[in-house]
Amino acid sequence: MYRLLTSSAFVIGLATSSLATGATTTEAQLVSRAEGGDVDAMLKLGLLHYLSVGQDGETGETVKWYRRAAEAGNVDAMMQLSRLYAFEFKNQPDANVEAERWNKLAISTLSVRADRGDLTAETHLAYVYDLNSNPDKAISRYRHAATEGSVEAMFELGAHYQMGWDLRQDDKEAVFWLTKAAENNHAKAMLYLSDAYEKGAGVEQDAGKAQAWRDKAAATERAKPKSESNEPKTYSWPED
């Protein structure tokens, strides 16, 4: 399961996106918001303590705030707890049990939302399956979400086809899904599509189109508001 938990890109990306919009917020303000039930503030506090202190132990502030966010239904906090128990607390009693528990809870929470038609949750679930080394479920979820209109899932499916991740490499399928994502202003898909035109992979080689997609990707990134970030979404607990 632990390809998910060793993903430093995930950890760094989550930390950056979560703290970026709160860069001018003091810790005291975050604590006040968290104590008032703000789940995003709880997650930010966990990240803040992790980045400033590092491994502060199972009873430290990092785990305290991650746990509170996770118990309020935040999937990213569940995944961080699973990673901490799998690696940083691995020598503690029941560490593997805790790691597995939080990982399974993240999956079940996302599954409930995905099965109710939440495409963001389904794409997130596919990502979790992907990093948990469960490629069949990952691709199935990506494909369904992409077909239903998730731009992020379109990109992920296209990238998987282009790179041959978890399925047979298929340049034409890659271009199909990357084009859909790019046409919906997904900057990274534009770059992958540019690479396809540059190499003539799945399309006729065309340096002009390759450059055009690179330029559009750069323009798309420049047009984003400075405050825009991929804030973690808070998901509800599964209902009985």
Image (cartoon, grey):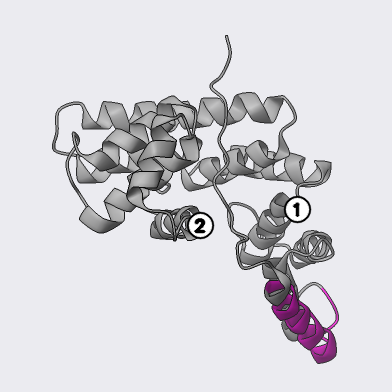
How far across and how far down the image is residue 207, in percent? 80, 90
Q: Main secondary structure of the magenta part?
A: helix
Residue type, mark 2 in image: Ser
Quadrant of image for the C terminus? top right
How far across and how far down the image is residue 47, in percent? 36, 49
Residue type, mark 1 in image: Val
How far across and how far down the image is residue 189, in percent? 71, 67
Looking at the image, residue 200 lies above or below residue 151: below
Which mark is in front, 1 or 2?
2
Q: Nearer the viewer, residue 79 or 155?
A: 79
Q: Residue at x 56, y 44 (%)?
A: 135
Q: Residue at x 34, y 31 (%)?
A: 67
For residue 134, side relative to residue 88 (left or right): right
Does the image show residue 117?
yes
The numbered mark, 1 or 2, whose residue comes first in the sequence reads 2
| Secondary element at image label 1 | helix
Callout count: 2
Q: Residue at x 63, y 60 (%)?
A: 228
Q: Which residue is mark 2?
A: 17
Determine the image quadrant of residue 224. Answer: bottom right
Q: Which residue is mark 1?
A: 151
Query: Residue 199 in magenta?
Result: no
Determine the image quadrant of residue 66. Answer: top left
Does the image show residue 86?
no
Query: Residue 218 in magenta?
Result: yes
Mark 2, residues whose alpha carbon is within 10 Å: few (<14), some, or many (≥20)? some
The residue segment tinted magenta is 203-221
